Amino acid sequence: MRLRKDIHLGTLLALPPASRGWRASLDEQLQLLKAEGYEGAQAWDGWGAIQRAGLDASGIARVTRPEQLDPLARQHRAEGLLYTNLHLGTGFDSDAEMDALAAALLEAQARHGHRLLVETHRATATQDIWRTLRWVERFPDLRFTADLSHWYTGQELTYGGEFAERMARLQPVFERVRAFHGRIGNSGCLQTPLDRPGLYLDHYRAMWTACCAGFLRHAEPGSALSFNAELLPMAVGEGAHAMWLHYQQATQAAPTDPWQGEPCDRFADAEALWAIICACFHQACHDTATETPTP
């Protein structure tokens, strides 16, 4: 079992020309990814361009109704995708609606032999940690993409100085993580550069190591754990046609600012996140190798 160096293509969106990841076209950026040792890229669509560049492709989709899952799994398997990352539900789902989505997901996954991973994400069924943990009790076969920034910031895991206690309660999800969205935030900002003061980096290292250990304990032999840096811009496009994401917390750009208002090079930070997850995976390998197997 091993770690895969993948990337979310949103990390390459709207990069300033000074970024090491800037290129004049997506095709050139994909060739850069290949040269930098990335194995795959994740996107909502356009998977053919990824595959033509010699990279594996994985998918992303938003699903709000159970009947959407079967055709999605069929299509994404036909497209040759490694797996699909799902924004499942709306966050207003009842327990019965969450259960219907989970049952349909597991059925579609089994029927088409295509892995469907539920992302921990705001504005979806997983936005509330307590309800997600109860959901896992009812559907232990669910597997997850861990975008832990949505919980660390969105549910303030550091509240009351209780990070360790709160993290311990997340173990049922950590055991079921089979992919990452690599983003690090602090208690007040969902996506932050990696040089800000505070304990957040240590906290993410601890959570990511726990997820890696869960993968090593329970995944099938020969499996790969996909790590996708996902560092999104403030906005894509300009004027009335701009799509505002508000992930990168932009500042007012000075005339000499090489990042044009962005506080860091997102592509360089993606490489830094890869170094962090590699250290976490190494630590998890050490930790699980010394565990006593459970009968």
Image (spheres, grey):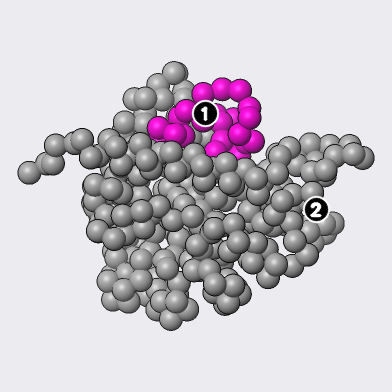
Is the magenta region chiefly helix, strand or loop? loop
Q: Is residue 187 magenta?
A: yes
Give the mark nearer the N terminus: 1 vs 2. Answer: 2
**Which amino acid type is marked by label 2?**
Pro
Observer able to see residue 71 = no
Which is more toward the observer, 282 or 82? 282
Residue 84 lies in magenta, yes or no?
Answer: no
Name the quarter where the C terminus is drawn: top left
Q: Amino acid at mark 1?
A: Tyr
Q: Is residue 23 above or below residue 207?
A: below
Determine which residue is flagged by label 2: 17
Element under label 1?
helix
Q: Read off the residue under disc 1.
A: 200
Q: Nearer the viewer, residue 52 or 192?
A: 52
- In the image, residue 66 sits, relative to residue 8, either above or below, namely below
Local SS, label 2: loop
Residue 146 image offset from top left, x and y in percent: 43, 47
Which quarter of the rendering shows the N terminus?
A: bottom left
Q: Which residues are magenta?
A: 184-207
